[in-house]
Amino acid sequence: MIISKQTLLLGATAAIVLAAVLSLSLETVAFAQSPILEGANAARGANQPSQLFGDTGIITTVTNTLLFVAGALAVIMVIFGGLRYVLSGGNSSAVTAAKNTVMYAIIGLIIAFLAFAAVNWVLSAIAPGTSGG
């Protein structure tokens, strides 16, 4: 297989353009961090937390609270689905509905944890060295 000079030139140009775009995007993230934090601090009222990110930040508190609520609801729905299963009395449609309740509760819990991981990933990209929870 012979690679032409045009293909090599095109590949090298693409690599240079990609490197330039990546370096500009990293600088943009670092530059955009300051206005984000300034806007959050300007909107902050008296007696409000001063940090948007970090262990005691607002986003961390909201994320942890929502994750707790999602986990509690998932546990309640698993218990409810188990009770429906036990009380189904052999009715096939009731058994199917109970199994679906348990399955969807577990799927919802998995989605909640994946969302938590996504929030942490985005926060680490916006403000390096911090996490959402």
Image (cartoon, rainbow, N blue to C red):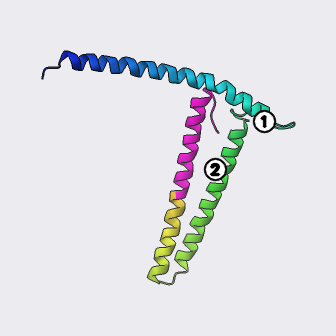
In the rendered view, tell whether residue 15 sits above or below residue 50.
above
Q: Quadrant of the N terminus?
A: top left
Query: In front: 43, or 97?
Result: 43
Residue 12, by quadrant, is top left
Which residue is located at x 68 percent, y 24 percent? 34
- Residue most toward the right? 46
Mark 2–mark 1 CB contact (< 8 Å): no
Percent x, y of residue 28: 57, 23
Residue 22 position within the rendered picture, expressed as x and y whole percent measured from the top left: 46, 22
Q: CA distance from mark 2 to mark 1?
A: 25 Å
Q: Is most of the magenta stretch helix, strand or loop? A: helix
Residue 116 rendering spot, x and y as whole percentages: 58, 44
- Observer-nearest residue: 17 or 52? 17
The range drawn in magenta is 108-133
Q: Residue tagged by mark 2? A: 67
Would residue 63 be counted in the magenta stretch? Answer: no
Could one spot residue 50 in this view of the protein?
no
- The number of numbered discs placed on residues in the rendered structure image is 2
* Secondary structure of the residue carrying numbered label 2: helix
Structural crowding at the residue carrying mark 1, measured as other residues with C-alpha within 10 Å and reported as few (<14), some (14–19) or many (≥20): few
Identify the residue shown where x is 59% and y is 70%.
80
Q: Residue at x 53, y 47 (%)?
A: 114
Tell me the kind of residue under disc 1: Ala
Question: Which residue is labeled 1 in the image?
Answer: 43
Q: Going by the image, does 93 lie left or right of 127?
A: left
Up/down of 77 relative to 121, above or below: below
Left of 30 or right of it: where is 7? left
Q: Position of residue 61 (x, y in %)?
A: 71, 42
Mark 2 or 1 closer to N-term? Answer: 1
